Amino acid sequence: MSESGNRIKQAGLATVFLGPAVFFFILIIVFPFISGIYYSFTEWNGVNATPIWVGINNFQQILFHDTQFFTSLWFTFRFTVTTLVITNVLAFGFAMVLIQPLRTKVLLRTIFFLPNVIGGVLLGFIWRFILVNGFSTIGEITKLSFFALPWLGSPETGFWGLVIVYTWRSVGYLMIIYIAHLLNIDTELMEAAHMDGAGGVYMFTRIIVPLSMPAITVCLFLALSWTFKSFDIVLSLTSGGPFRSTETVALNIYLEAFRYGNYGVGSAKSILYFLVVGVITLFQVRQTKKMEVEA
Amino acid sequence: MKKMLLGLIFLLSIGFLFAAGNKEEQKTTPRELNLYHFKVSQVEQWDQLVKEYAKVEPGVKLVVETVGGAADWTTTLKTKFASGNGPDIFVVDGPALANTFSEYLSDLSDQPWVSHAVESAKRPMTFEGKLMGMPFNLEGYGFIYNKKIFRDAGITKTPGTVQELRDAAEKIEAMGITPFGNGYSEWWVIGMHLMNIPFATLQDPASFSTALDNGTASIADNAIFNSFKETFDLTIKYGNKNPLTTDHNAQMTLFNTGQVAMVQQGNWKEVGIYEANPDAEVGLLPIPVNNDPAVSGRIPVGVPFYWVVNKESDMKDDAKKFLNWMVSSEVGQRYITEEFGYIPAFDNIKSDSLGGLSQDILTYASKGKTVPWSFTTWHDGMYNEFSEHAQRYVADKISYSEMLKRMQESWVKLAE
Amino acid sequence: MIQVRRRTIVGVMELGMVLIAMLFLAPFYFVVVNSLKPFGEILKNAASLPRIIAWSNYTNAFSKIKFLSVFSNSIFITSLSILFLVIIGSMASWWMVRKNTKFNGLMFFAFVAAMVTPFQSIMIPLMRVVTDFHLLNSRIGLILVYLGYSTPFTVFLYHGFIKSVPIQMEEAALIDGCNIFQIFLYIVIPMIRSMTITVIILQTLLIWNDFLLPLLILSKRSLHTIPLAVFSFFGQYTNRWDYALATLVLGMFPIVIFFLFMQKYVIAGVRSGSVKG
C-alpha cells in the first residue's frame, strides 16, 4: 500500500473511532465555550438581543476592582486542597479495608456509596437541616462543644460544613475506583514481598501505593475537578454565606452572570478562572504522571 | 456479543419509537400558548385551569411551565430568552426584572382589566405612562406573631413602635419564651425584606433611589436608616441563638413549636402554619423603624409577581385574552381567591376566605397603613450585597454605621 | 498465630467500619423518617420518629408527579446516554492511547480541561446550540447533549485504564490477520470490561441525578425526569418536604438496586479480565 493510501486509511479510521466523541464534544462544550469568549468582551445582561462590545473593560474591572472574585478564588483553593486530601486519604483507607475478607463488605461498600444516589442541590438542603437543627439538638443533649458550634453561621463553620458534606459525598465514589484498582494489583507480588518478610509499612509505602499510582492520579484529579467547579451543593448548603465567606468561584460567576445580570463580566470571570485552573490541572496531571513512571 | 448487539438494536428501536411518537403529538395539538411561572405549590390548580380554559378557547392549548425557587426561576427564564425560547406569558417579580426584559414586554395599558386593578399595584410596573404587567394578588410581611403567647404575656395592645415592641419582647422573655426567631441566614429575609423596611418607610423611596444613583443622597446620613438600628438590635438581643445558621425552615419550626413568639415572614407561610397547627392563632405585626406612631406601624404590601406578555410572540393577542379571562371571568376569579387563596389586587374581585395573616394585611391596607416593596426596584444583585453587610453586622464583625456605609457603597457600585 | 492475629485485626477493622458506616447513614435517617411524616409534623420536629406513619405522602407523590411517566423518562434517557457514551468513549480512548499523535494529545488535554470548567460558564451559549439544532423538549436531544457533556469524563476514565492494558495481544491478533475492528471488538472490549462497569456506574449516577440540563432542555412536564419531579415541591419561600422526600426515596430505590447489581460485576469483571495476561 502506498504511503498516501495508508494515510487516508488512517484518517478514515480515526474518523470512525475518534470522530463521534470529538464531534459531540466540540458541539456541546468547545463551541459554547468559544462563544463565551466573545461574550467576555461585551456588556450584556444575558437577555437582550444584542450584546455591546466593550473590549477588555470586563477584564480590567475584575482584575482591578473586584475583590470578591479573589476572595472566592482563595476560598475555592483552600477548600479544594483540604477536601482533596481528606477525601482521598479516607477513600484509600476505606478501600484497603473493604478489600479484606469482611463479612459485611458488600453492605459496607453500598453504604459508603449511598450518598451518591442523592443529587447535589437536594443533598445541600438535607445537610443544611442536619447541620443547623440536628447538630444543635445533639449539642444540647451531649454538651459537646463541637455540635454546639454555630454551624454554617460563621466563615469557619461554613468552610468545615462544606468539607464535611463534600467528604461524605465523594468518599464512596473514590473508594469504588480505588477498590477496582486495588483488586487488580498483582497478588503474587504482595505474597512474594510478604514471604521476604516485608512489614506492613514497607508493603504499603513501597508496593501498594506505587502500584496504585494510576488510581491515585484519577482520584486526585476527579476530586479536584469537583471541588474546583463546586456549585450546586454550595448554593443549597450555604448560598455562599454568611457574608459571602463561602462563595466558590463557580458560585461567584453564577451570581455575577445571573443575579447581578452581568453576563459579560461573568463570562470574563469564567475565562480567567479557566486559565488559572487549566495551569493547575496541567501541573497536577504532569506531576502525578511523573510519579507513575518512576513507580 | 450477539446478545449485546440485539439489546442495542432493541433499545435503539425503542428510542426511535418514542422520538417519533413525540413529533406526532406536536402536530395534532392546537396552537400552544406557553406560560411560565414559579409558584410550584399551584401546579395542580393550574392543571385544572388549563382544562377550564380549553372549554372557553378550544383553539388554544395552554402549556404551563413551573420552575421553583430551588431551581432559581429567573436564571432559567433568562436562559430561555437568551437562546430564543421565551415563553408567550411569563412572570417578573417587579420593575427591576422587568427592566432586564424590557425588550420583550408588551404594553398592556389598553386592557379591559386595567381600571379595576388596585392603583398601588399598578404603579411599580408603569414605565413612561405605560402599564407593562398585570398584578394578580397582594402579599404582605412583618412579624408573624403567636396570639396565644402574646395573650399569656399580658400584651393587650398590638405593638406599633419600637418601644412598644421592646416592652412586648421583655414580657415574653420573662415567661421563658424567646421573643424573636430570626432567619438571618436567608438572604431574602435579611437583605431583601428586612432592609426594605427603612427604605420603604421614607417619604418618597423612588426619589431616594434616584438621589442615591446621582450621589445626592446618603444611606449613612439618613435618619430612618439610623433609627432602624434600634429595631434590628432588638431582634438580635431578644432573638434565638445563632440567627446566622437559621434559615426559613428552621425559623418556622421555632415558631410552629412555640419556642419563639415572632418570626419575620409573610402570608406565604400561612398554609404551613395551619398545616402544623390547624387551630393556630396568628396575626401580623408591622416592623417599626422608630418611636413615632405616625411613621412606624406600617405593613409592607406589594405584588409578588406580575404577568407580562412577550412582545416577540406570535400568540400575543391570545396571551392578552387569557390574562383578561383570568381576572374577569367567574372561573378565573374563583381560582384567584379560592384555589390560590390570594388577596386579589383588583377591586372587582371579592374574597372572604382568608386566613389570619391575610386579614391583618387587608386591615392595614384599608387604613392606608402600608409601605411599598421597594426592593423590587433595587438594582440587580442589591439584596445579595445588603444581606452580606447585614450578616456581618449580626455576626458583630462591623458596626452599624459601617454597615450603612457599605450599603451605600454597594448601591453606588451596582448603579453604574 | 499470624492467622489469628490477622483475623482479630480484620475483626476490629470491620467493627470500626460498621461504626463509620452508621455515621454515613445518618442523613438517610432524616430522609426516610421525614418522608413518612405528615407535613405539619416535619415542620414541628424533623428529628423524631413519626408518630403517625403517613403512607399518603408516597401515594400522593406517586400520583402528583405521575411517577411512572417520570420514571420511564429517567430510565430511557439514562440507559441510552450510557450506551452511546460507552461506545464512543471507549473507541475514542483506545484510539487516543494507541495512536500517540499530536492531535490526540491535544484532544486529551481539551477533555481534561473541560472537566474543570464550571457548567454555568457555557450554559447560555449551549442553550443556543440546543435551540438551533432543535434539541429542545426532546429526550433524544438531551441524550445528544449528554454525549458531548459526559464524554470528557468517560474518556478520562478509559484513557488511564487502557494505558495499563498490555498491547501484546492486540499485536498478536494483528499478525493473525484480524482487522482493526475485530481487534477492538474481540480483544479490547473484553479486556477493558471492568472499567466499562465503572464507567456505567459513575455516569449513570451523574445522569440519573442531573438536574440542570433536564430543567433547561425538557420544559414539557410529560418529559420530566425524577430530579425535576423532586424539585417540583420546592418553592422560593416554601418547601413541601413531605412530598419531596417521598419522591426522593422512590427515585433512590432503582439506583440502589442497580448499584447492588453492578457491584457483582465489578469484582467478577476484575477477576475474569485477562489484564495481567
Image: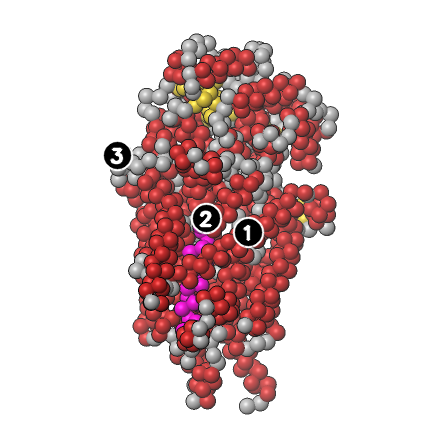
Relative height, residue A30 to residue B209 (above, below): below
Q: Is mark 3 on a helix, strand or loop?
A: loop
Real-space Cα separation, disc 2 to disc 1, in angstroms: 20 Å
Q: Distance between the residues labelled 3 and 1?
A: 43 Å
- Residue B387 spot, x, y in % from top left: 58, 32
The local secondary structure at tag 2 comes to helix
- Relative to B214, does residue C217 appear above or below in the rendering? below
Prevailing secondary structure class for the magenta stretch in the rendered image: helix
Q: Position of residue B364 (x, y in %)?
A: 48, 15
- Give the residue drawn at x 39%, y 23%: B258
At label 3, counting other C-alpha atoms closer than 10 Å, the crowd grade (few under 14, some 14-19, many 20 or more) is few
Task: Give the residue at mark 1.
Answer: A82
Q: In which quarter of the image is the N terminus of chain A?
A: bottom right
Q: Residue B6 carries which label?
A: none
Location of mark 3 (residue):
C52
Residue C31 place in picture, x, y as percent:
36, 43
Q: In which quarter of the image is the C terminus of chain A?
A: bottom right
Which label lies toward us, 2 or 3? 3
